[in-house]
């Protein structure tokens, strides 16, 4: 139950952060005409339960939420479809990751 409350708090904090945030433009995959959409998911390490805290967001939104440089995250997602979201992770308790669609 504590994890659920924490995840809800993280999601609300992310929404509050992004409410007044203006992005320069969506990150585009090479040769793509539409923005790359990703999900940010948190997994409870003990139970394996997963909660998607951000769904179908652009790479810049996920980058801000996870504390990663947008260009770095874009380059990682060009090479792989999943990467860690260290800012929303707590070692031995929960793991957060970004997954490209």
Image (tube, grey):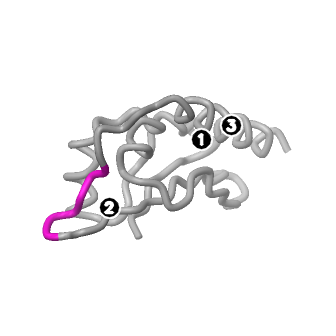
Q: Which residue is drawn at 85% across and 45% down?
A: 1
The boundaries of the magenta stretch are: 26-31
Residue under numbered circle 1: 92
SS type, badge 3: helix
Q: Which residue is drawn at 36% across and 51% down?
A: 59
**In screen coordinates, is 14 left or right of 84?**
right
Q: Position of residue 64 (x, y in %)?
A: 42, 35
The residue depicted at 43 percent of the width and 60 percent of the height is: 38
Of the numbered discs 3 and 2, the one sitting upstream in the chain is 3
Which of the two discs, 3 and 1, labels the residue nearer the N terminus? 3
Labels 1, 2: front one: 2
Question: Of helix, strand and loop, which mostly describes the magenta segment?
Answer: loop
Disc 2 crowd rating (10 Å Cα; few below 14, some 14-19, many 20+) is: some
Residue 35 is marked as 2
Direction from residue 92 to residue 4 in the image, left or right: right
Rendered view: 45 above or below 8 = below
Q: Mark 3 points at which residue?
A: 12
Secondary structure of the residue carrying tag 1 is loop
């Amino acid at each position: 139950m504590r994890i659920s409350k924490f995840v809800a708090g993280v999601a609300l904090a992310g929404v509050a952060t992004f409410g007044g945030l203006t992005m320069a433009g969506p990150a585009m995959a090479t040769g793509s005409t539409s923005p790359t959409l990703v999900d940010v998911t948190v997994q409870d390490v003990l139970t394996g339960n997963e909660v998607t805290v951000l769904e179908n967001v652009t790479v810049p939104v996920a980058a801000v939420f996870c504390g990663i440089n947008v260009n770095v995250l874009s380059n990682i997602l060009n090479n792989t479809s999943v990467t860690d979201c260290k800012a929303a992770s707590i070692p031995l308790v929960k793991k957060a990751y970004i997954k490209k669609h």
